[in-house]
Amino acid sequence: LLAELNKKLVKKGAKTILYGCSVEPDLLKDPAVVEDMSRYSLITVRESITYNAMKEAGVKTDIMLVPDSAFILSKNETVLPEGFVKGNTVGINISPMILDYGSGKLFDAYCKMVEHIINTTDMQIALIPHVVWQSNNDNIPIQKIYDIFKDTGRVVKIEDCNATQLKWCISQCRMFIGARTHSTIAAYSTCVPTLVIGYSVKSRGIARDLFGTEEKYVVS
């Protein structure tokens, strides 16, 4: 649909920009995808894997490597829930999308992780949503995890708030484990040690650009 729209706009003389994208390199093996990419007047990509793949595939347009704008998003203080200990809380984000990829095993892995943190450390755990769309709502799996561990007194939930406030909440964590790309960027950009639960090229590419490798920074 987007490719067809791009084609029609360019045919009418419009200039189009593909902004802040990540594209799986395998998709660029399709000549139709390369043709569509080449129609844009400008493409900005947020990580080097996509940038190099587009160059190698022969995309004929101006391509710029530009960090995701979420890196420079400001943060604004908000109220933390009772039980959140600044500097000694592990922030955890989970999304329905990665649960679909994980075929049920991933939810169990998250629960084992929470159990391990409770049993082997004195850290609190904050479950932090980052997307709450009706069709794709982080609060659904977050509530399930919270219900399992709420009686321990070690797990709290961050209520939905705006992006700058979520970034501030994440910045108060001792470390962060996240699935949503922009939740992990909130942690990266506030110098919170971060482990990414990655499902696409964007998580690998961003980690590689920051650290020189995605190994041990991204769990597939």
Image (cartoon, grey):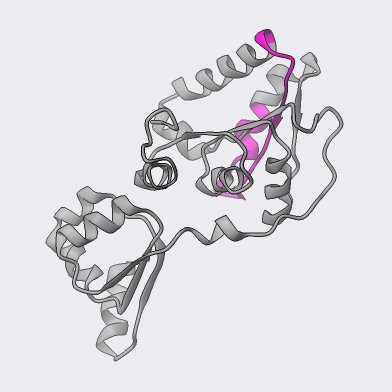
The residue under the point 74% across, 26% down is 88
Residue 202 in the image: above or below residue 107: below
Q: Nearer the viewer, residue 112 or 47?
A: 47
Residue 71, position in %: x, y?
56, 55
Q: Is residue 40 left or right of residue 134?
A: left
Task: Farthest residue to the bottom: give it.
Answer: 13
Residue 145, position in %: x, y?
65, 24
Quadrant of the snapshot with the C terminus: top left
Q: Is residue 64 left or right of residue 175?
A: left
Res 162 seen here: no
Residue 18 in the image: above or below residue 125: below
Magenta residues, start to end: 119-144
Res 181 seen here: yes
Task: Farthest residue to the top: give it.
Answer: 119
Quarter where residue 147 is shown: top right
| Magenta-span inclusion, residue 140 | yes
Q: Is residue 115 left or right of residue 77?
A: left
Quadrant of the snapshot with the N terminus: bottom left
The residue under the point 63% across, 31% down is 175
Q: Number of labelled discs?
A: 0
Residue 149 in the image: above or below residue 172: above
Quarter where residue 208 is shown: top left
The residue under the point 66% across, 9% down is 120
The residue under the point 50% across, 46% down is 181
Residue 49 in the image: above or below residue 192: below
Residue 35, position in %: x, y?
17, 69
